[in-house]
Image (cartoon, rainbow, N blue to C red):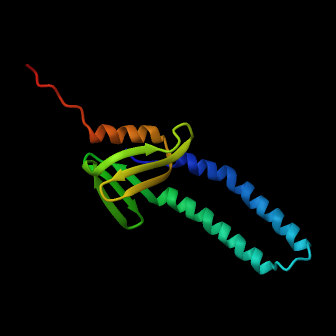
Amino acid sequence: MKITREKHLDHMVRIVPLIVMGYAIQCYIISGMETPIGSTSLIVLGGLLCMMIAGFVTYDIKHQVVLSDQGLEISFFHWKRSIPYSQVYTVTNSSPETHFSTITILCEKKKLRFYFVDDAAKFCKTIEEKRFPKQEKAAA
């Protein structure tokens, strides 16, 4: 099983044009006013807005979390880390009723957070099942 973030990407596709349009309207209004804010400031703020949106999309696409038989395999670009299920203490879902939410995993050495996770409740349940596998009864 792998964490997916398609719902967050779909949300970004719907909301980013509105954010950009709102920013463009603000720039138009401010440029028509006699204020000390120059066009350079508006360009810098627009660039920062673009960087923020690009950061969200990069995180959604490049941050991979896979549940293997041995544990969680986390990768981001060339960085990779593996966490065995035996090191996982708790798994919490920040808002189970939403389309995408944040999962917090408390481990032996640190707390991990995964943002914008689709079907977070299913992901948490799967981790719990992998942490505590059902004991097979011996046939008598």
Reply above or below: 131 against 9.
above
Residue 39 at x, y percent in the picture:
80, 78
Residue 46 at x, y percent in the picture:
71, 70
Residue 103 at x, y percent in the picture:
45, 48
64 or 92: which is nearer to us?
A: 92
Q: Residue at x 78, y 59 (%)?
A: 22
Quadrant housing residue 79: bottom left
Reply above or below: 33 against 117.
below
Residue 91 at x, y percent in the picture:
39, 45
Q: Residue at x 48, y 40 (%)?
A: 119
Q: Outermost residue, top direction?
A: 140
Q: Residue at x 52, y 46 (%)?
A: 101
- Image-based side of 140 in relation to 63, left or right: left
99 or 21: which is nearer to us?
A: 99
- Image-based side of 10 in relation to 106, left or right: right
Q: Residue at x 11, y 25 (%)?
A: 138
Quadrant containing the N terminus in the rendered view: top left
Say how many tags the image has: 0
- Image-based side of 117 in relation to 107, left or right: right
Reply above or below: 37 against 89.
below
Quadrant containing the C terminus in the rendered view: top left
